[in-house]
Amino acid sequence: AQKVTQAQTEISVVEKEDVTLDCVYETRDTTYYLFWYKQPPSGELVFLIRRNSFDEQNEISGRYSWNFQKSTSSFNFTITASQVVDSAVYFCALSEAQGNDYKLSFGAGTTVTVRA
Amino acid sequence: GAVVSQHPSRVICKSGTSVKIECRSLDFQATTMFWYRQFPKQSLMLMATSNEGSKATYEQGVEKDKFLINHASLTLSTLTVTSAHPEDSSFYICSARLAGGDIQYFGAGTRLSVL
């Protein structure tokens, strides 16, 4: 069963538009961690954010913001005033329980294209 | 901090040869390293989990004799693709987890092309 669902395959926006990436997860654990990673065309995965299941506080970092809602099992990511450099594939990931070596279950990824 | 170096970034080899990929944590000790495979326009597929000083744990369907993993120190893990064939051509990415932490930091990946 898919543990992390990113329903949006591709999103294309014009520069300065906001873009929101959806992420829905599934787990029976009470302790878990959620992540967002960015994969630019170069291929390296860049860590963006980590959230534990006990911290539902939303977070903002520059033009990035994250909305964590346990009630809907969602951890959405918004890029405000998008720029061409934001073009990349974004992955949402889930890590369950400590005894699992903190393995990551990745979503399918959302390709964001920002046009000038 | 938390830099992971992966080498080589690209390798082209002939069918039947073996290829070794190195993954190093440069500024931290990584008790656990992970190896992933990624096909074009797809997500990352975990191949194996490597703990320092012990045998790697392979995911279901991954041939352990084909993909040899060695985690000899807290800063180095290697993946050897033995007797590579064209179907092994892919993008391989490693990650390292800081001891006591839960964040995985990724290398830049290795693009393997087997002719």
Image: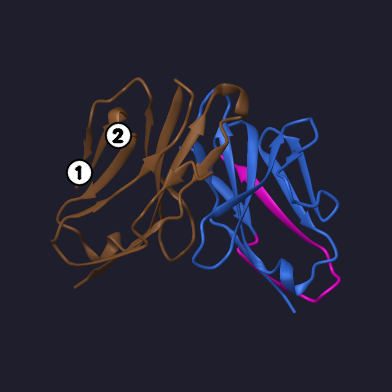
Chain colours: A brown, B blue
Q: Residue at x 81, y 48 (%)?
A: B64
Query: Distance between the Cα atoms at labels 2 and 1?
Result: 25 Å
Q: Residue B40 vs residue B75: left or right?
A: left
| Residues shaded magenta | B8-26
Tell whether position B21 is magenta: yes
Q: Percent x, y for residue B70?
A: 78, 43
Tell me the amino acid under the disc marked 1: Gly
Asked which secondary structure carries label 2, the reply is helix
Return the residue at label 2: A72
Q: Nearer the viewer, residue B88 or B19?
A: B88
Q: Nearer the viewer, residue B112 or B63?
A: B63
Asked which secondary structure carries label 1, the reply is loop
Q: Residue at x 64, y 33 (%)?
A: B32
Tell me the amino acid under the disc marked 2: Thr
* Res A24 label: none
Lower sequence index among marks 2 and 1 = 1
B10 vs A56: above or below: below
Return the residue at label 1: A62
A14 vs A36: above or below: below
